[in-house]
């Protein structure tokens, strides 16, 4: 695990993966391109609370967080194709919400339990 205060280590997709939106590269991507729906990460987190999030935001959050956690872009895309794209939304939405929560509030061991 890194010293990244936003990094979550989660059992997902058959393995343990690190997710982080706090990585400097990811922060630049979010600043320049944002999320597909055009909302900020904090705004998207609010949308998770009222179940008005969009599937493309769920996908982008997970993809960027995998890369921010240290995974290569190619490996992240392969995992996305196997476990996110075209799959039921609820489980992946819970993961994306937890990733945003870690970005906003910081990752804590107790937070990791909520999204497993």
Image (tube, helix red, strand yellow):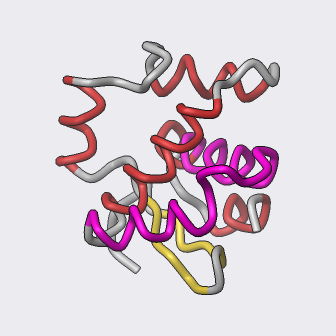
Q: Residue at x 64, y 76 (%)?
A: 13
Characterize the magenta stretch by its predominant secondary structure. Answer: helix
Q: Residue at x 46, y 62 (%)?
A: 19
Magenta stretch contains residue 93: yes
Question: Residue 58 in the image: x percent, y percent?
Answer: 59, 39
The furthest residue to the top: 38
Q: Is residue 50 above or below residue 110?
A: above
Please indicate whether residue 89 sits to the left or right of residue 78 in the image. right
Q: Residue at x 27, y 53 (%)?
A: 23
Magenta stretch contains residue 86: yes
Q: Is residue 30 above or below residue 43?
A: below
Question: Residue 108 in the image: x percent, y percent?
Answer: 60, 61
- The image quadrant that residue 113 belongs to is bottom right
The N terminus, quarter of image: bottom left
116 and 73: which one is in front?
73
6 and 13: which one is in front?
13
Please indicate whether residue 81 sits to the left or right of residue 24 in the image. right
Q: Which residues are magenta?
A: 73-101
Q: Is residue 39 above or below residue 76?
A: above
Count of numbered circles in the view: 0
Question: Residue 7 in the image: x percent, y percent?
Answer: 44, 62
The C terminus, quarter of image: bottom right
Please indicate whether residue 27 sits to the left or right of residue 40 in the image. left
Question: Residue 47 in the image: x percent, y percent?
Answer: 69, 20
């Amino acid at each position: 695990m890194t010293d990244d205060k936003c990094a979550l280590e989660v059992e997902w997709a058959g393995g343990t993966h690190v997710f982080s939106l706090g990585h400097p590269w990811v922060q630049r991507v979010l600043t320049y391109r944002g999320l597909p729906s055009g909302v900020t990460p904090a705004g998207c987190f609010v949308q998770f609370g009222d179940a008005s999030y969009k599937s493309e935001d769920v996908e982008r959050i997970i993809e960027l967080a995998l890369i921010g956690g240290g995974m290569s872009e190619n490996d992240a895309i392969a995992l996305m194709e196997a476990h996110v794209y075209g799959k039921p939304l609820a489980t992946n939405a819970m993961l994306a919400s937890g990733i945003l929560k870690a970005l906003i509030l910081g990752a804590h061991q107790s937070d990791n339990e909520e999204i497993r």
